[in-house]
Image: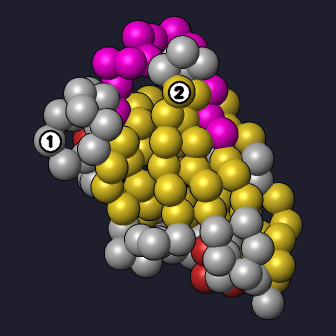
């Protein structure tokens, strides 16, 4: 079955950086769009970034554009999220997810498999 395992979360001061990883198994990784979402306490899960499987096009939420970078290594079945210039409002549980979408995959309903999440906490 499809399994997604996030890692790399932790506690960081505002202005710092973290790199999240998501290792996938049980699927032909290169044929799946990969996305990152986050959920802060008391808030709905929201889109952060995605990388389309067919052409590598990336998509970002306005709140992270210019600070976060999504990338993938198909040979390692892994997607990454490099997060720079972190802010306290970036504090959330971060989830990776898979999608077969070949359009603009920014909606939760576009995604079929989800990881368990990794906590990111940014202190002020």
Determine crowd level at label 1: few under 14, some 14-19, many 20+ residues with C-alpha closer than 10 A: few
Give whichever of 106, 45 is nearer the camera. Answer: 106
Question: What residue is shown at x 66% (from left), y 39% (from top)?
Answer: 21
- Percent x, y for residue 119? 73, 57
- Indicate the quadrant containing the C terminus: top left, top right, bottom left or bottom right: bottom right
- Percent x, y for residue 74? 48, 20
Question: What residue is shown at x 54% (from left), y 15% (from top)?
Answer: 75
Horizontal side of 54 relative to 26 (left or right) equals left
Is residue 117 something that shows in the picture?
yes
Magenta-colored stretch includes residue 77: no
Report the residue that reaches farthest toward the left: 103
Residue 73's disc number: 2
- Percent x, y for residue 33? 34, 33
Is residue 109 something that shows in the picture?
no
Position of 32 relative to 2 (above/below): below
- Which residue is the site of mark 1? 103
Question: What residue is shown at x 32% (from left), y 18% (from top)?
Answer: 31
Q: Secondary structure at mark 2?
A: strand
Give whichever of 41, 35 is nearer the camera. Answer: 35
> Which residues, given as a range, are shown in magenta?
21-33
Horizontal side of 66 relative to 11 (left or right) equals left
Question: What residue is shown at x 42% (from left), y 44% (from top)?
Answer: 35
N-term-proximal mark, 2 vs 1: 2
- Percent x, y for residue 9? 76, 53
Decide: marks 2, 1 in contact (CB < 8 A)?
A: no
Numbered disc in front, either 2 or 1 = 2
Tell me the distance, in whole angstroms, between the alpha carbons under discs 2 and 1: 21 Å
Q: Secondary structure at mark 1?
A: loop
């Amino acid at each position: 079955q499809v399994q997604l395992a996030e890692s790399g979360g932790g506690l960081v001061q505002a202005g710092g950086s973290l790199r999240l990883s998501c290792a996938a198994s049980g699927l032909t990784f290169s044929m799946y769009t990969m996305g990152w979402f986050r959920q802060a306490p008391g808030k709905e899960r929201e889109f952060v970034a995605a990388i389309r499987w067919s052409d590598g096009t990336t998509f970002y939420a306005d709140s992270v554009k210019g600070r976060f970078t999504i990338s993938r290594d198909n040979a390692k079945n892994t997607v990454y999220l490099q997060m720079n210039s972190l802010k306290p409002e970036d504090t959330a549980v971060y989830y990776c997810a898979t999608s077969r979408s070949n359009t603009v995959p920014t909606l939760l309903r576009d995604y079929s498999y989800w990881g368990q999440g990794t906590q990111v906490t940014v202190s002020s």
